[in-house]
């Protein structure tokens, strides 16, 4: 049996699939990842990207933070790819229970997925740090320097920065979904960013599938490992 046939058989026999994904899910939509050879972390800036995406940097150098954020973190023209679309199709068919994502681009919802746990937040949501007023993505894109609310407060993206904690309710929902799953598909993630990567440990089933272009620390534990692009792989799965 080929890897694809094995994956299809697992999907056919499951009714509470959970998909856990990282940056590699969105690279096929033209959104660059962080850790590949041409990823964000290998590009040269005045400060390391990890520093510029930290809470401390946001507080101490907000103008530089927003220059970097607008330039590298916003991809408003990106569209869902085959992976996003197949997962939404699986959800509509009653096969997929939830998507747990480390991505902040909102593409799963754009493809039609309803039950999505965004561990690291979303660029589509922005709130004033003073009064809490909501602002859309377009407000951040269209502003210059430090985006300000009508009350004068700084408008901060609802994105989890380094040094910040994950949202408790989102994390609890993701843990509950993974714990209850009868199949867990992990795709497009290096599984090195914690605490998000640790969520896989809550899965106790026998249908753990890893789909990634490079090896991960959990490959030896998985029931099936497929080396390749997540979109190209999931596109071949039939929903029945």
Image (spheres, rainbow, N blue to C red):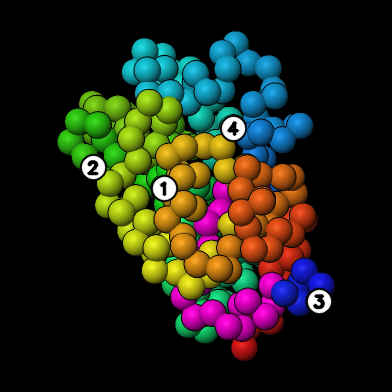
Q: Quadrant of residue 31?
A: top right
Tags 4 and 3 in contact by the CB under 8 Å rule?
A: no
Point out residue 181 in the picture as x, y percentages from the top left corner. 45, 69
> Which percent across, then down, holds residue 1?
81, 76
Task: Compare marks 4 and 3 and give the one earlier in the sequence.
Answer: 3
| Residue beneath disc 1 | 119
Image side of residue 65 versus residue 185, left or right:
left
**10 or 66, which lies in front?**
10
* Magenta part of the chain: 7-24
Q: Residue at 48%, 73% (x, y): give it.
A: 182
Label 1 crowding class (10 Å Cα cut-off): few <14, some 14-19, many 20+?
many
Mark 3, Cα crowd under 10 Å, few <14 / some 14-19 / many 20+, is: few
Q: Residues within 10 Å of mark 4 (few under 14, many from 20)?
A: few
Residue at the image point whose x is 49% and y is 53% from the top:
200
Using the rendered image of the protein, determine whether residue 93 is visible from the camera's viewpoint: yes
In front: 164, or 58? 164
Report the residue marked by disc 3.
Answer: 1
Local secondary structure at mark 1: loop
**Residue pointed to by mark 4:** 72
In reply to whether residue 6 is colored magenta, the answer given is no
Task: Kindly report the distance in space between the C-alpha atoms of the residues bearing marks 1 and 3.
Answer: 35 Å
- Measuring from the top left, give residue 46's x and y in whole percent: 60, 11
Disc number lying in front (4 or 2): 4
* Disc number placed over residue 133 in the picture, else none: 2
SS under mark 2: loop
Instruction: Indicate whether 111 appears above or below 102.
Output: below
Mark toward the start of the polypeptide (1 vs 4): 4
Residue that sits furthest to the bottom in the current view:
240
């Amino acid at each position: 049996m080929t890897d694809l046939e094995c994956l299809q058989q697992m999907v056919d026999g499951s009714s509470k699939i959970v998909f856990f994904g990282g940056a590699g899910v969105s690279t096929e939509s033209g959104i660059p990842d962080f850790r590949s050879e041409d990823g964000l972390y290998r590009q040269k800036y005045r400060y390391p990207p990890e520093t510029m995406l930290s809470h401390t940097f946001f507080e101490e150098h907000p103008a530089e933070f927003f220059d970097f954020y607008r330039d590298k973190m916003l991809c408003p023209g990106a569209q869902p790819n085959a992976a996003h679309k197949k997962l939404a199709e699986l959800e509509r068919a009653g096969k997929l229970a939830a998507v747990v994502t480390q991505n902040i681009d909102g593409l799963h919802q754009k493809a039609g997925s309803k039950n999505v746990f965004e561990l690291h937040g979303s660029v589509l949501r922005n709130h004033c740090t003073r009064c809490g007023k909501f602002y859309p993505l377009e407000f951040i894109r269209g502003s210059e320097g430090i985006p300000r609310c009508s009350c004068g407060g700084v408008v901060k993206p609802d994105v989890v920065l380094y040094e910040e904690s994950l949202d408790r309710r989102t994390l609890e929902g993701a843990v509950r979904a993974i714990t209850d799953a009868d199949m867990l598909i992990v795709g497009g993630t290096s599984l090195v960013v914690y605490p998000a990567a640790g969520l896989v440990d809550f899965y106790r089933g026998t249908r753990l599938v890893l789909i990634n272009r490079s090896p991960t620390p959990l490959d030896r534990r998985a029931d099936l490992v497929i080396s390749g692009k997540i979109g190209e792989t999931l596109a071949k799965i039939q929903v029945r």
